[in-house]
Image (cartoon, grey):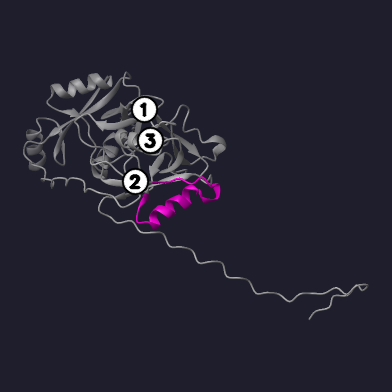
C-alpha cells in the first residue's frame, strides 16, 4: 500500500478519504432517519455534495453499486405548500444533480442517488424506504480554506422595484391589463435581460411568500423552464433548484407542449403555486436584479419604415384594360 494511502486510512480510521472529508459506505439498508442517526453516532452526517467535483467522485464510486443510496438532502415544507431542499448538516444547497423530471414532489421528501454505469443522479423518495447510504465527516488532518464572510445584502432598490432587507435582489412585477402588452416566456426573459436583470428565480419559501403577496391576484412567468433533452427543470440564470412549489398534479406537460413555468398567486397573496404552461402564452412577468445594480430602460424599437408608395392603377370605365401612369 502506498505511504500516502496508508497515512490517509489511518487518519480517517478506516473510512475513505476524498478532499476535505472522510466517507463511510454503509451497505446495510435503513430509512433516511435511521441512516442519519447511524452517521451521527459515528460523529458524522449523511453525505453532503457541495460541488461538481464531489458529485463526480461519487458518480464513479456508485457506478458499481446497485439500488439507491441516501444522501443528506431533504425537503422542508413551507406554509404555502412549497418546499425548500436543505442538507441535514445545515449547509446551503448550492449545487444540484437532479435526475430526469426530478424533484417531482410526488414520491417523497428525502433524496437518494441512483447507481450503475449512468448513475449519481438525485431522486426524491419516501423517507421510510430503506436504502444504503454514505456517511461523511471532516478530515482531522486538513483544514478547509477559510471562506470570506458573506457580506450583508445591500439596501435600497430603484424606483418601481421592491424588496425586503434580508433579500439580495430587488423585484419588479410587469403587470399589463392589455393582453397585447403581455409577453411569452422567451420575450419576458429578454425584457428582463435588457434591463440588466433576470427573469426571477425563486430560491426559498421566504422569497416565494414575499413574491406571492407582492404580486397577488396574478399569474406571471418565473425563470423556470423544462429541458426536454436532459429532463427536469432549471432556472434561466443557472441558480440551483433548491425550492419548488408545484400545484396539485403539476407539472403535467399537457399534450407535451408545456415547458415553461408560471407562478399563480391567490387573490389576497397568502398562497401561491407553480404551473407548467405553453411557453408562447402571453403572461405578466417578474424581473429580479441584484441590489446595488441600477436597472436600465430597455431600448425602444424604432418606428416602422413606411413602404415605398406604389403608383395607382386606373381602370377606365367600359374597358377591360389597365392603364398605368
Q: Which residues are magenta?
A: 173-198
Residue at the disc numbered 3: 212
3D distance between C-alphas at marks 3 and 2:
12 Å
Of pointers 1 and 2, the one earlier in the residue sequence: 1
Assess disc 1: are there few (<14), some (14-19) or many (≥20) residues with their C-alpha within 10 Å of its C-alpha: some
Mark 1 and mark 2 in contact? Answer it, CB < 8 Å: no
Direction from residue 150 to residue 179 in the image, left or right? right
Most extreme residue toward the right is 318
Coordinates of residue 260 in the picture (x, y in percent): 47, 42
- Tell me where residue 191 appears, x and y as whole percent: 43, 54
Which residue carries the number 2 mark? 171
Task: Check if residue 171 falls in the magenta segment.
Answer: no
Residue at image point 19% right, 32% down: 90
In the displayed structure image, the side of residue 41 where residue 271 appears, left or right: right
Looking at the image, tell me whether mark 1 or mark 3 is earlier in sequence order: 1
Question: Mark 3 and mark 1 in contact (Cβ < 8 Å)?
Answer: yes
Q: Quadrant of residue 132?
A: top left
Q: Position of residue 236 (x, y in %)?
A: 38, 47
Between circles 1 and 2, the one closer to the viewer is 2
- Gap between marks 1 and 3 measured at Cα: 10 Å
Badge 2 local density, few (<14 within 10 Å), some, or many (20+)?
Answer: many
Question: Which residue is disc 1 drawn over?
Answer: 80
Secondary structure category for the residue under label 1: loop
As helix, strand or loop, the secondary structure at mark 3 comes to: helix
Residue 189 at least partly seen: yes
Measured Cα–Cα span from mark 1 to mark 2: 20 Å
| Disc 3 packing (10 Å; few <14; some 14–19; many ≥20) | many
Amino acid at each position: 500500500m502506498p505511504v500516502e494511502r496508508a497515512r490517509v486510512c489511518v487518519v480517517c480510521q478506516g473510512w475513505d478519504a476524498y478532499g476535505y472529508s472522510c466517507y463511510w459506505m454503509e451497505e446495510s439498508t435503513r430509512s433516511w432517519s435511521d441512516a442519519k442517526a447511524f452517521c451521527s453516532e459515528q460523529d458524522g452526517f449523511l453525505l453532503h455534495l457541495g460541488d461538481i467535483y464531489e458529485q463526480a467522485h461519487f458518480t464513479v464510486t456508485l457506478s458499481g453499486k446497485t439500488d439507491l443510496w441516501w444522501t443528506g438532502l431533504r425537503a422542508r415544507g413551507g406554509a404555502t405548500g412549497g418546499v425548500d431542499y436543505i442538507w441535514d448538516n445545515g449547509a446551503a444547497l448550492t449545487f444540484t444533480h437532479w435526475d430526469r423530471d426530478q424533484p417531482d414532489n410526488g414520491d417523497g421528501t428525502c433524496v437518494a442517488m441512483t447507481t450503475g454505469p449512468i448513475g449519481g443522479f438525485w431522486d426524491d423518495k419516501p423517507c421510510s424506504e430503506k436504502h444504503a447510504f454514505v456517511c461523511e465527516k471532516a478530515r482531522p488532518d486538513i483544514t478547509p480554506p477559510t471562506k470570506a464572510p458573506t457580506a450583508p445584502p445591500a439596501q435600497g432598490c430603484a424606483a418601481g422595484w421592491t424588496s425586503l432587507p434580508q433579500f439580495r435582489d430587488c423585484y419588479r412585477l410587469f403587470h399589463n391589463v392589455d393582453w397585447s402588452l403581455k409577453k411569452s416566456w422567451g420575450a419576458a426573459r429578454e425584457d428582463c435581460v435588457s434591463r440588466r436583470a433576470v427573469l426571477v428565480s425563486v430560491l426559498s419559501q421566504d422569497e416565494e411568500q414575499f413574491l406571492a403577496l407582492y404580486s397577488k391576484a396574478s399569474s406571471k412567468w418565473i425563470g423556470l423552464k423544462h429541458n426536454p433533452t436532459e429532463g427536469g427543470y432549471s432556472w434561466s440564470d443557472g441558480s440551483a433548484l433548491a425550492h419548488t412549489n408545484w400545484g396539485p398534479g403539476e407539472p403535467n406537460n399537457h399534450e407535451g407542449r408545456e415547458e415553461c413555468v408560471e407562478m399563480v398567486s391567490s387573490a389576497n397573496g397568502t398562497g401561491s403555486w407553480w404551473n407548467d404552461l405553453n411557453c408562447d402564452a402571453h403572461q405578466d412577468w417578474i424581473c429580479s436584479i441584484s441590489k446595488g445594480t441600477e436597472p436600465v430602460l430597455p431600448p425602444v424599437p424604432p418606428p416602422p419604415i413606411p413602404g415605398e408608395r406604389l403608383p395607382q392603377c386606373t381602370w377606365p370605365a367600359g374597358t377591360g384594360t389597365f392603364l398605368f401612369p
